[in-house]
Image: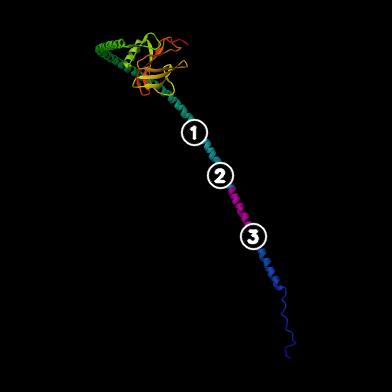
Amino acid sequence: MSPYENHPQPAPPAQGPGVMSYILLGGVIALVGSNVFMFLEIDKMKQELARTQEGMDKEFVRVKESSQATSRAARERAEQLKEELDAARRQASMAAGQAKVDAQKHADEVAKKLEAEQAKALRAATEETKAEAARAVTEAKAEAAKGIGEVKTEVGAVKTDVASTKSELDKTIAGLKRAQGDLSDQGSLIATNSKELSALKALGERNFVEFKLSKTKQPQRVGDIALMLKKTDQKKNRFTVEIVADDKRTEKKDRSINEPVQFYTSKARQPYEIVVNEVGKDLITGYLSIPKVLNAR
């Protein structure tokens, strides 16, 4: 058996309450110190704020007093300027009155000078105008004499042309052919060309409407009637045409050139006449002769 057996080990010494107490006491002291420091800082800040507020109040009072002083100075300056403006207006009014008198006086003097100059210029212009008028009259007389001579020459030439034209027209009229119509017992004067048609128009007995009619499916307007070419024979100078008048259709078959194709309408007692001077391929050229006197409607 070992000599150490059955001998218990000694227990560790127990710690007393003193150490924990010291730790807690230290924490409390630190907390109290911190609070005191914070209180002192807050008090210091309050004092700073109080001094700042006092300074701001003093500055506000100073600015207010300065503003009031500036306003008083501005009002005083405005009153001064108003007085100066009124004085300037009075002086300007007095000056304007005097200037008006001076200007009127100067205007009267200028008007007198202008009147004298105008009178002088008028006399000079009158003399010059008289001279110009005399020259113009002389030139006009010379031009008139020259013009009269030229007019006499032209009138003579015109008279000669008129006489020649009249003589030619008389010859043409005398040479007009008279052809027998298909409805009238009396023959009608017809024209075979434009020259003879002009001679017929000069007689003034009837009205004339020239036409160039091609072959169509619908009637074509000629004067106050309508015509429709239906057939042509260019070699034999013959044609067939349909006449539309008074809402009636009349066909004139196998007619020859320079033949009066006659028909009556309700508008006149004398017959209308169609005279064709040329026959082409599906084309005829001629004129419509209309009585001068038409019935009133």
According to the picture, the residue beneath numbered tag 2 turns out to be: 63
Circle 3: element type: helix
What residue sits 51% from the left and 34% below the top?
A: 78
Q: Tag on residue 48?
A: none
Circle 1: element type: helix
Provide the residue span drawn in magenta. Answer: 40-56
According to the picture, the residue beneath numbered tag 3 turns out to be: 38
Q: From the viewer's perspective, is the residue at label 3 or at label 1 nearer?
A: 3
Q: Residues within 10 Å of mark 3 (few under 14, many from 20)?
A: few
| N-terminal label among 3 and 1 | 3
- Residue type at tag 1: Leu
Q: From the viewer's perspective, is the residue at label 2 or at label 3 nearer?
A: 3
Q: Quadrant of the N terminus?
A: bottom right
What residue sits 60% from the left and 50% below the top?
A: 53
The residue lying furthest to the top in this view is 186
Q: Position of residue 3 (x, y in %)?
A: 73, 90
Q: Tag on residue 81?
A: 1
| N-terminal label among 2 and 3 | 3
- Residue type at tag 3: Met
What residue sits 58% from the left and 47% below the top?
A: 58
Query: Does residue 239 sit above or below 29 in this rendering?
Result: above
Query: In the rendered structure, are the residues bearing label 2 and label 3 in contact, judged by CB atoms less than 8 Å apart?
Result: no
The residue lying furthest to the bottom in this view is 1
| N-terminal label among 2 and 1 | 2
Q: Within the image, what quadrant is residue 153 found in? A: top left
Query: CA separation, marks 2 and 1?
Result: 26 Å
- Residue type at tag 2: Val
Camera-side residue of 149 and 290: 290
Q: Residues within 10 Å of mark 1 (few under 14, many from 20)?
A: few
Position of 228 compared to 6: left or right? left
* Residue 187 located within the stretch drawn in magenta: no
